[in-house]
Amino acid sequence: MTTTPLLRNCQRRLALAWYTLSACVIGLIAVQIQTGVGDSASWTWLSPHIIPSLSLITGAVIAAETRADEQKRVSPFLFRLGMAFSILYLLAILAVIVGATNSHSRIDALKRSDLYLGPVQGIVVALLGVFYVSTHHHDAASQRVAADKDLDPLPNQHENEV
């Protein structure tokens, strides 16, 4: 029987994978820029591929660490899927950067990769959302709606409306 992992532990593991692999990617770009292999266009290409996800993860980790200890659990399947897609996505970015090093038109090679990295990034962000998007506001809103229904003088009148 598989135990269901705690959300906080999954967040921490995903964050560690993202921080570690992103540091490798950023380090590689920095070295290439410093050695003249790359230029600022490389950083411009890289930023939209990792910064939004890192910002989401960082903000959620900070928020989680400042809240009381929660015991929410998540699907082990979704965690493994999110981790696998995250690692594969970041390794694909590394492979593109290394592969573009030998290209005559480096920036064109980087831009061509957007054709497949963009859709994969969409899947990765959707999977990360399972772990990093807060449900506290949604839960509070659901409780308000439920409370409003209790106060509704004509509770059955709106049920068939879409």
Image (cartoon, helix red, strand yellow):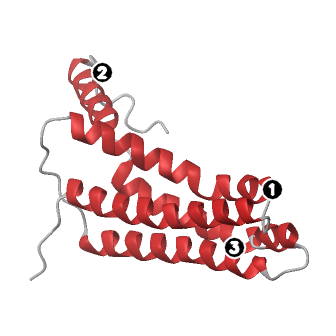
Mark-to-mark CA distance, 3 and 1:
12 Å
Residue drawn at (34%, 55%), measured in percent from left and top? 131
Residue drawn at (68%, 78%), measured in percent from left and top? 98
Q: Is mark 1 on a helix, strand or loop?
A: helix
Please name the amino acid that badge 3 sits on: Ile
Residue closer to the observer: 156 or 40 = 40
The residue under label 3 is 97
Image quarter of residue 4: bottom left
The residue under label 1 is 41
Residue at the limit of the structure toward the right, as seen here = 104
Q: What element carries label 2?
A: loop
Q: Is mark 3 on a helix, strand or loop?
A: helix
Please name the amino acid that badge 1 sits on: Ala
First along the sequence among labels 1 and 2: 1
First along the sequence among labels 3 and 1: 1
Front of the two marks 2 and 3? 3
Image quarter of residue 129: bottom left
Residue drawn at (74%, 65%), measured in percent from left and top? 35
First along the sequence among labels 2 and 3: 3
Indicate the position of residue 53 as horizontal and vertical percent values.
Answer: 51, 53
Indicate the position of residue 61 as horizontal and vertical percent values.
Answer: 32, 45
Label 2 crowd (10 A; few <14 / some 14-19 / many >=20): few
Seen in the image, is 16 located left or right of residue 73? Answer: right
Please name the amino acid that badge 2 sits on: Leu
Q: In the image, which disc is placed on residue 134? A: none
Label 3 crowd (10 A; few <14 / some 14-19 / many >=20): many
Residue drawn at (33%, 70%), measured in percent from left and top? 78
Indicate the position of residue 56 as horizontal and vertical percent values.
Answer: 46, 46
The residue under label 2 is 154
Residue 52 vs 94, above or below: the answer is above
